[in-house]
Image (cartoon, helix red, strand yellow):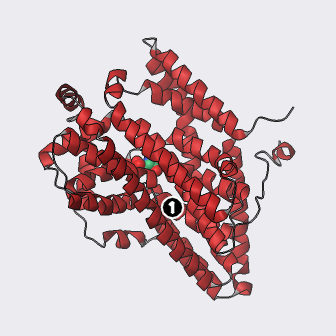
Amino acid sequence: MKKLELHWKILIGMILGLLFGFLMLQFDWGKSFVSDWIKPFGSIFVKLLKLIAIPLILASLIKGISDLKDISKFKNIGIRTIIIYVLTTVVAISIGLMLVNALQPGDGVSDETIAKLTDTYSSTSGVQAKIAEATKQVESGPLQFLEDMVPDNALSAMSNNKLMLQVIFFSIFLGISMLLIGEKRAEPLKNFFDSLNDVVLKMVDLIMLSAPYAVFALLASVVVSSDDPDILVALAQYSGVVVLGLLLMISFYVLLVTTITKKNPFWFLKEISPAQLLAFSTSSSAATLPVTMERVTEHIGVEEEVSSFVLPVGATINMDGTSLYQAVAAVFIFQALGLDLTFGDQITIVLTALLASIGSAAVPGAGMVMLVIVLESVGLPPELLPIGLALIFAVDRPLDMCRTVINVTGDATVSMLVAKSVGKLGEPKIKEWDDHYEEVK
Ligand code: ASP
């Protein structure tokens, strides 16, 4: 019998997880049962993915750069990547702004709903923590991000997943220096990182064997910790606009893949789907990164020289879904509170949402922290901030799941575009998920 493909297995795990979560909500003990006995398996899976993210970035980026044999090629890839990332993000924000202005979801929110949401959420620790975190970010100077990118200690950079850009910086620096000392002298180090790269990719395969079960656990725990369904319905119009925007963004990627890389878009979506499903289940592009790398390199055929740079950088700075959501959420909050936004304000949203999505960490809920900065930039008074966030807080998690899918799909699309433009989009090198697994058993 033909084995069920991975994405089907993951999808079945997700659906069963959702159903199980709803079932457990029917019992008094259901919620604590899920958080005590089911959730840990999802958390272990996410931890395993995060565990290999730093070694993978290190090994694949150093291997990728030292394979290039020529620094000018790296410069070429780097510049194209950044330009395309900025362009796709601007498209995402513009789609968000167009939809939210045309459909006006904020006008449909009644005063009672605003009062209810404000009562329930504005003083909760969740909302207050986001505001506090955002305030910390605002207090830093304009070039702080550049300073933050450069580590003063390679080992401490590698010991903190939040410092992924520092690890990227160190790996590029090391890779370029290896190119400069010449192939022969760099060979021992190159062999070491080549081998480390293969081993870490094998670890991805092994971790993915448990993906269908892990997503079951992740989704069951999201369901039992979600909010009152009535509130979710009250915010349906706003959520609908965000989701519609995200779907348009997928269509935009499909258009780019079809016209520029001349690949079949359905094939692209099928091959990338395990990464998308994991992005949805974990709400974290950083945790999904190892799987995105594996899919893009082995299943789509982007050569490692390109994917090893474009994807980790994308996971940290390119968040099209997040920026689209920030644009919609900011305007929605103004509409719901009956405040006006001028055309100039909307342009400010484009610029700040672009910077905010670059600055957002690739972890669950990060987009909302940076939304605070977008709201402040267009003059939302500080006393209205908790109310503004309270309005969208209840649906943040489901929307986070959806926008993370777009963030990951955007990174994969851009890696194909960059690869195509530098002649590095080859044929897939598919290895079975469990190849060699039988031998070592
Ligand atoms: N969860 C998103 C990501 O990891 C970031 C966000 O929008 O909150 O890509």
Structural crowding at the residue carrying mark 1, measured as other residues with C-alpha within 10 Å and reported as few (<14), some (14–19) or many (≥20): many
Q: Label 1's element?
A: helix
Residue sitting at x 83%, y 49%: 436
Q: Which of 69 and 336 is in front in this view?
A: 336
Residue placed farthest to the top in the image? 27
Residue type highlighted by circle 1: Gly
Residue 216 at least partly seen: yes
Residue placed farthest to the front in the image? 102
- Picture coordinates of residue 311 (x, y %)? 56, 61
User: From the image, which quarter does the C terminus lie in?
Assistant: top right
Residue placed farthest to the bottom in the image? 181
Q: How many marks?
A: 1
- Picture coordinates of residue 292 (x, y %)? 61, 53
Q: Mark 1 points at which residue?
A: 314
Residue sitting at x 69%, y 35%: 8
Residue sitting at x 40%, y 42%: 242
- Picture coordinates of residue 195 (x, y %)? 73, 65
Q: Is residue 170 left or right of residue 305?
A: left
- Picture coordinates of residue 321 (x, y %)? 44, 50
Label 1, ligand 1: CB separation under 8 Å:
no
Residue sitting at x 53%, y 74%: 80
User: From the image, which quarter does the N terminus lie in?
Assistant: top right
Q: Which of 32 and 362 is in front in this view?
A: 362
